[in-house]
Amino acid sequence: MLRQRTLQRKVSAAGIGLHSGKLIWITIKPSEVDTGVTFRRNDLLPVRDIRVSAARVINTNLASTIEERGVSISTVEHLMAALSGLGIDNILVEISGPEIPIMDGSATSFVYLLKSAGIKEQNKSKEFIEIIKPIMVIEGDKWAKLEPFFGFRLNFTIDFSHPVVSDSGQRASIDFETTSFSEEIARARTFGFVNDVETLRKKGLALGGGLDNAIVLDDFKILNKGGLRQSNEFAMHKALDAIGDLHLLGNTILGAYSAFKSGHALNNKLIREIQKEKNSWRIRSFSSLSKAPLAWSKQWAWN
């Protein structure tokens, strides 16, 4: 059968919070079957847990923030994307502050941490949310949708008038059967504009942001000396964000996601709509690997 997965051992790291600018420790631990992804604020007494779900997303301004009983954790999307890409179902994430460290602005550091801990299969079938009817959300000229597809595929289009972004290729097309999450998707970094950063800092936000953890652009060019890691890194990062946002449903999706100018808010609106439209999906598991989507067996082989 296609089994649930967790880690072999715990792993820890430290990094800067994007908005607080403070050093934050993160420890990722194995967890039992069917427990899903749980975040634990161990800087509080008593410690407080937040189990991942679409309904617990309370803020989508610049990042995805989850909350339970008045306690929140922000910037969860890159770690959630890494868990999705590596097929990890059950995990406990302990953090020493209110946000997940930004690391280098991509999901690469989280992929490295999770791989270094080792991935272990568990004695229970992995449960997918299989999309069986199209579902779509629209806000002005922005939209996002999920359609039936036996695997996991994303097509993401952005639309920025900045000369560098316009020339970069504003589309990312990903099929987990042919695209390695670790090698091609996880590397894409978040990006921002100098003028926006200055405005955010006046509001007490983005205090930890800089050239080490984001692609930064002025009106004409990229300020990072190394430039882009891949030609369509801007669009690829938006797709990475979407993978993390979708995984806040609590299960891996079988389906095709496509979007135009979507972001954290619209992605969350989409997964909330999925929860409401219960006839648009079903829970699916696979008793035999030969019957499972090739996309997932290939991802695991690459990883």
Image (cartoon, rainbow, N blue to C red):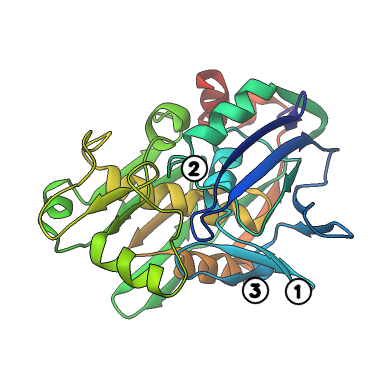
Distance from disc 3 to disc 2, alpha carbons, whole Å, reads: 21 Å
Q: Which mark is residue 124?
A: none
Q: How many tags in the picture?
A: 3
Is residue 135 something that shows in the picture?
Answer: no
**Element assignment for label 3:** helix
> Is 235 or 132 nearer to us in this picture?
235
Quarter of the image for the C terminus: give it: top right
Q: Secondary structure at mark 2?
A: strand
Amino acid beneath label 1: Gly
Q: Position of residue 261 (x, y in %)?
A: 31, 65
Amino acid at pointer 2: Phe
Q: Position of residue 192 (x, y in %)?
A: 30, 57
Quick one: label 3 or label 2, which is nearer the N terminus? 2
Residue corresponding to mark 1? 70
- Of callouts 1 and 3, which one flags the residue occurring earlier in the amino acid sequence? 1
Confirm or deny contact between disc 1 and disc 3 (CB under 8 A).
no
Question: Which image quadrant for residue 138?
Answer: bottom left
CB atoms of marks 2 and 1 within 8 Å: no
Residue 123 place in picture, x, y as percent: 84, 28
Side (left or right) of 94 relative to 211: right
Name the residue carrying label 3: 276
Mark 2 crowd level (few <14, some 14–19, many ≥20, 10 Å Cα): many
Question: Which residue is the site of mark 2?
Answer: 152
Q: Amino acid at mark 3?
A: Lys
Task: State which quarter of the image contains the N terminus.
Answer: top right
Foreground of the two, 204 or 81: 204
Name, please, the residue furthest toward the bottom. Answer: 140
Label 2 – label 1 distance at C-alpha: 34 Å
Task: Answer above or below: position of 68 versus 169.
Answer: below
For the question of whether residue 140 can be seen, the reply is yes
